């Protein structure tokens, strides 16, 4: 059993604290920790099912379930009208994967090595998608500025951005989804040998059956839904109790919790000198959030919550998105990494965290 699964004890603890009407900060903390093993279990089940089903169906499985924890948390937050928390969490996921996860992987993997190498073409493709993503995500914000609508203010609850910005958000969301689907065709069909070397390896010992994978996936989804409901339900009161803004909680705490399983796998792969996998997880997941999760949430917001959510970010979020996309793209473009590059990425992530805290 993986050590991360021992954290599952916090799931019943969070339920008991919620039923006992304990302090929101305690419910938030225990449910946040409880999401981690649930997400890790979902990730393992998805990995096993993808390996059994083959690259085509495996890609579809990963599209559907790879970012399920973030989707579940965000949908529940949308239903509670926490749109700014959702947008902050999306930004936090993109920035966290591109800076924190990639930086931690480079630092851990390169600490005892002169340098590590990875496939330059694949890395440039992934980072190109990431750069496209962050630019597309901020375009509606630029339109809002051009029309003198003003950007959201940190801490301001604002639901209405105008029908025009909502239409633009839908259009951008559809373009991003189509781009993501094209990326799947590129990586799983037309250029699958580039992205899936050695995919014809024999089945690993102890591989799960399809029935077991589906059963575990359903169980992990239920656990993730329960802990996410507790997490979202306690955000408002917990943030005030512990002295943190909902903006900071969404961008850093919720984002890190939702991606905890991916963080662990990427760093472990880098330590084993498998930087191809580490870079694909970090940069690829960051791009996937913007190309798939964010657009899907835009479309879902038209049927869930008090009003549709527009892709209009505040100034801090725009700066974080653009800096993460540009810096990550620059550092992976040469196909090599060192521990100092990882340190630089983590340093930038820390600086952004300080700014977001005081914002």
Image (cartoon, rainbow, N blue to C red):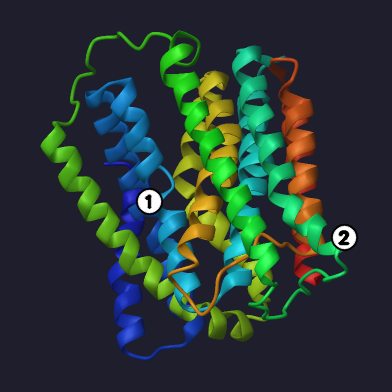
At 72% from the left and 78% from the top, the residue drawn is 155
User: Where is residue 300 shown, x and y percent of the image?
Assistant: 46, 62
Mark 1, Cα crowd under 10 Å, few <14 / some 14-19 / many 20+, is many
User: Where is residue 122 shown, x and y percent of the image?
Assistant: 59, 17
Quadrant including the C terminus: bottom right
Relative to 59, residue 94 above or below: below
> Which quadrant would residue 313 be assigned to in this image?
bottom right
> Which quadrant would residue 237 be assigned to in this image?
bottom right
Residue beneath disc 1: 39
At 40% from the left and 39% from the top, the residue drawn is 63
Secondary structure found at label 2: helix
Q: How many marks?
A: 2
Numbered circle sitting on residue 146: 2
Chain-order first, disc 2 or disc 1: 1
> Which quadrant would residue 271 be assigned to in this image?
top right
Numbered circle sitting on residue 203: none
């Amino acid at each position: 059993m993986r050590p991360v699964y021992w954290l599952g004890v916090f799931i019943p603890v969070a339920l008991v604290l919620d039923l006992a009407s304990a302090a929101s900060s305690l419910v938030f903390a225990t449910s946040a920790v409880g999401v981690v093993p649930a997400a890790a279990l979902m990730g393992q089940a998805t990995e096993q099912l993808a390996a059994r089903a083959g690259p085509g169906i495996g890609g579809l499985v990963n599209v559907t379930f790879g970012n399920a924890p973030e989707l579940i948390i965000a949908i529940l937050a949308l239903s509670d009208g926490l749109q700014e928390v959702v947008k902050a969490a999306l930004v936090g996921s993109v920035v966290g994967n591109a800076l924190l996860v990639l930086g931690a992987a480079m630092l851990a993997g390169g600490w005892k090595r002169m340098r590590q190498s990875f496939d330059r073409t694949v890395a440039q493709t992934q980072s190109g998608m990431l750069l496209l993503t962050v630019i597309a995500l901020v375009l509606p914000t630029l339109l809002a500025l051009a029309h003198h609508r003003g950007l959201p203010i940190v801490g301001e609850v604002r639901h209405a951005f105008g029908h025009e910005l909502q239409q633009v958000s839908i259009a951008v969301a559809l373009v991003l989804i189509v781009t993501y689907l094209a990326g799947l065709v590129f990586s799983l069909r037309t250029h699958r040998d580039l992205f899936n070397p050695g995919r014809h390896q024999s089945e690993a010992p102890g591989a799960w059956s399809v029935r077991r994978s589906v059963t575990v996936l359903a169980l992990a989804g239920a656990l993730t839904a329960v802990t996410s409901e507790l997490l979202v339900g306690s955000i408002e009161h917990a943030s005030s109790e512990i002295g943190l803004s909902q903006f900071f909680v969404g961008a850093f705490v919720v984002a890190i919790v939702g991606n905890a399983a991916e963080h662990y796998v990427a760093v472990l792969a880098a330590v084993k000198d498998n930087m191809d996998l580490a870079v694909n997880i970090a940069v690829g997941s960051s791009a996937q959030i913007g190309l798939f999760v964010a657009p899907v949430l835009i479309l879902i917001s038209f049927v869930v919550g008090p009003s549709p959510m527009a892709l209009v970010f505040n100034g801090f979020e725009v700066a974080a998105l653009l800096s993460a996309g540009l810096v990550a793209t620059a550092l992976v473009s040469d196909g090599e990494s060192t521990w100092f590059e990882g340190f630089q990425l983590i340093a930038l992530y820390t600086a952004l965290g300080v700014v977001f805290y005081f914002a």
